[in-house]
Structures are given as C-alpha cells and as structure tokens.
Image (cartoon, rainbow, N blue to C red):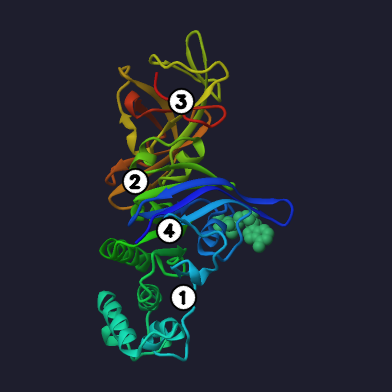
C-alpha cells in the first residue's frame, strides 16, 4: 500500500499543447481518487504520467513517498485497468491472469495461489478454463481486474474501465469495483468522464477543466458547495440551474428584464449568477409572497416523467431552468409555475464563474 502525491505536475506535448497545467493532488494510502472532467481536460494524460507511460514535463510524482519521475512503468509497482480490457483472446482466463506473473519469473505454485485467490474474490473460479470470447462483458472486465489484482501492486490505475459496458452492467460493476477496492485497500486513481460514476466511487473527487483542477474534495461536499459555475454544471444530473442577474435599488434584474425581490442578497457591482439545484425548488400554487426565498415565474416548455419523479423544463428570467418534482404529478397543462428558491439552497457565483461565499 502507498500514498500518491502529485506536485506541480505539468505536461506539454510538442512545443505548445499544455495538456496538464501544474496539478497538485495528494491521495492517502488506501483511498480511491477519481479524476473527472470533460473530454480533453487532461485526465488520461495525468493518469499516464502516474503510470510512467508518459514523460513528465515539470513537477514530481511520488508513490509511497518516493519520486518515480524517472522510473519506467514496470518499476513503479502499479497495475492498470483499461477500457478495452486487452485480454489475450487465445488464452484461458487462468493464463490471462497468470501471464504477467510468469513473465516476471514467479514460481509456479505462487502464481497458482495468487490467480486462485483473485478468482475467488472476483467470483471467477468457475470460469478459469474459459476463453475471453466465452465470457460476458462484465466477466471480461472482472478478468481484467483479476490481472491487476494478482500483481498485488501498490497502486491501481483505472482508465475509464466501464465505458464499454451497457448502463445496467456499468451500475453493477461500479458497485463491484467500489467494494473490491475497499476490501483490498489498495490506493487507486480512477479516470472517468461520467459524473455519476465519479460521485459514487470517489473517496476524493478531482474535477478537472482544461488541464487544471477546478475543485478537489469529498463528492458530496463538492455537490453541496461547487467552487465554480463549471463544477456546478458538471456535477449533478440534471445540472444546477444558473441564472445571470444584476442588482439595482429595487431588487434583482434577470436577463429578460424581469425584476424579483433580492431577499437581502448582496451582489457584486457587475452582477452574478444565481445557482439552484433542480431538486431544491419549491413549486408554489398561490400568489402569496414567500419569506426567505427568491420567487421566479417559470414558463413551462415540457415535462419529462421518469418514474419516481418528473423533470419540468422551462424558462425563468430568460434562462432555461429545470425543476425536479416528486412523483408523476407534474401537470403538462400548467404553462406557468411559481417556483421558490429557498435562501439556504441558493448558490452565488461571480461573473468570473467563482463561488461567492454567503455574506
Ligand atoms: P482526457 O483524458 O481528459 O480526454 P487527454 O489527457 O487525453 O484528455 O488530452 C488532454 C489534451 O492533450 C487534449 O487537448 C489532447 O488533444 C492533447 N493530447 C493528448 N495526447 C496527445 C499527444 N500524444 N500529442 C499531442 N497532444 C495530445
């Protein structure tokens, strides 16, 4: 077991593409760290630098308190699990798992014990004689995990391991990976573009954007206090609503000129974004003024019933907004709704996109 520490890590491809712009991350021993962000934000590059598959332009990567910048992948004591499992098609499950250990010249009985132990953990014992084409997608993914486990590395690195699986299987495997990682207690770094996967797996979540870290923290802390409009709209589905506002003497002014009461909210001179999660809104039928919240008029564009709840899409103050309402009760026929954002559920961001802490 080991900790992983990245200090001012940079990567420049060629002479000008700065794919990773000086990143600092500390992953404690045994923790599962998830790097999440849109395509092209630099997460694979960062993972590959930890793995030793990509040179490091600047900064240091430490594994188990030792700088590994100059070590090759084989010397870093890491094991990687990829999206395309890269199993050898002509080899049985057993041999796929044993292959790396044989290459290292490990004694046969020791290999046998490691493969069988891993197979038991992964419930692959009955499948050791099969070839990859005789396995389901989830089973193949487990063999790929098995191949990583038998090496008993200091660190697991996962590069979008579930993105080839269908949604249902992805959900199952997510739980399996989380349980397995806990059980084995191996420090892990996991890359995904899927915010749900990131939220559910991570002990420590790193949200990346354009080669930089936007926010690091526990998943729910990030959900509750996103540091920027980028994080607010990336974490959570449907994402947080963000409505641009300015203030004048009589209250807040929305994009389309609508005025609403400011409810004691103090805005920067150049305006701000108010943010609110779709589930945090109260839908009000009456016309009474609500104390302690902002009241918006929502012009309904459509309702999506998804079973246990419904998403109501609409326009408020000239901006698109989505509201989650419980059950199937949302009416298709109401073309206007009054929605209230309780003040304690309100997020405020500057025009630079950065979170403004409550006054
Ligand atoms: P992600 O994994 O978040 O999708 P990547 O780490 O793959 O992002 O890529 C980050 C940036 O670096 C992108 O702009 C990508 O085009 C660029 N990039 C990745 N690999 C190379 C390479 N080998 N040569 C030049 N540019 C690269």
Provide the residue designation for mark 2: 310
Q: Earlier in the sequence, mark 1 or mark 2?
A: 1
The answer for how far apart the CA atoms under marks 3 and 1 are is 44 Å
The answer for how far apart the CA atoms under marks 2 and 3 are is 30 Å
Q: Earlier in the sequence, mark 4 or mark 2?
A: 4
The answer for how far apart the CA atoms under marks 4 and 2 are is 35 Å
Badge 1 density bin: few <14, some 14–19, many ≥20, Cα 10 Å: some
Badge 3 density bin: few <14, some 14–19, many ≥20, Cα 10 Å: some
Indicate the secondary structure of the residue bearing disc 3.
loop
The answer to whether 196 appears left or right of 67 in the picture is left
Visible in this render: residue 94?
A: yes
Instruction: Look at the numbered disc 3 and say if its residue's Cβ is closer than 8 Å to ligand 1.
Output: no
Q: Nearer the viewer, residue 9 or 19?
A: 9
Tell me the number on the disc at residue 119: none
Occupied quadrant, residue 136: bottom left
Occupied quadrant, residue 311: top left
Indicate the secondary structure of the residue bearing disc 2.
strand
Q: Residue at x 53, y 46 (%)?
A: 23
Occupied quadrant, residue 154: bottom left
Name the front one of labels 3 and 4: 4
Q: Residue at x 53, y 30 (%)?
A: 318
Residue 264, image x and y in percent? 39, 14
Q: Nearer the viewer, residue 152 or 300?
A: 152
Location of the N terminus by quadrant is: bottom left
Provide the residue designation for mark 3: 356
Indicate the secondary structure of the residue bearing disc 4.
strand
Q: Earlier in the sequence, mark 1 or mark 4?
A: 1
Q: Earlier in the sequence, mark 3 or mark 4?
A: 4
Provide the residue designation for mark 4: 189
Tell me the number on the disc at residue 85: 1
Q: Earlier in the sequence, mark 3 or mark 1?
A: 1
């Amino acid at each position: 077991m080991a900790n992983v520490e990245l200090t001012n890590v940079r990567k420049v491809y060629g002479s000008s593409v700065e794919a990773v712009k000086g990143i600092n991350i500390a992953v404690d021993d045994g923790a599962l760290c998830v790097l999440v962000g849109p395509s092209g934000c630099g997460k694979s590059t960062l993972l590959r630098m930890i793995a030793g598959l990509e040179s490091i332009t600047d900064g240091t990567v430490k594994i188990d308190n030792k700088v590994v910048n100059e070590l090759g992948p084989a010397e870093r004591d890491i094991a990687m699990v990829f999206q395309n499992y890269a199993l050898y098609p002509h080899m049985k499950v057993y041999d796929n798992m044993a292959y790396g250990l044989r290459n290292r010249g490990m004694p046969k009985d020791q290999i046998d014990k490691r493969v069988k132990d891993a197979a038991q953990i992964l419930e692959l014992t009955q499948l050791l004689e099969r070839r990859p084409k005789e396995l389901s997608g989830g089973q193949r993914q487990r063999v790929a995990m098995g191949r990583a486990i038998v090496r008993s590395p200091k660190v697991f690195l996962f590069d979008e391991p579930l993105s080839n699986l269908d949604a249902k299987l992805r959900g199952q495997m997510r739980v399996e990976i989380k349980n397995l990682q806990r059980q084995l207690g191996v420090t892990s770094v996991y890359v995904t573009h899927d915010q749900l996967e990131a939220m559910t797996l991570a002990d420590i979540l790193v949200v990346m954007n354009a080669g930089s870290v936007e926010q690091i923290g526990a998943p729910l802390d990030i959900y509750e206090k996103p540091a920027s409009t980028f994080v607010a709209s990336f974490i959570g589905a449907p994402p947080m609503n963000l409505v641009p506002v300015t203030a004048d003497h009589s209250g807040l002014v929305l994009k389309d000129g609508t005025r609403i009461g400011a409810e004691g909210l103090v805005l920067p001179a150049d305006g701000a974004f108010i943010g609110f999660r779709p589930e945090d809104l109260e839908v009000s039928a009456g016309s009474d003024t609500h104390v302690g919240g902002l009241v918006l008029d929502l012009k309904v564009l459509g309702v999506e019933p998804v079973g246990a709840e419904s998403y109501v899409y609409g326009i408020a103050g000239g901006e698109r907004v989505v509201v989650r309402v419980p059950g199937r009760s949302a009416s298709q026929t109401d073309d206007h709704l009054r929605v209230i954002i309780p003040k304690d559920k309100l997020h405020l961001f500057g025009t630079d996109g950065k979170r403004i802490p409550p006054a």
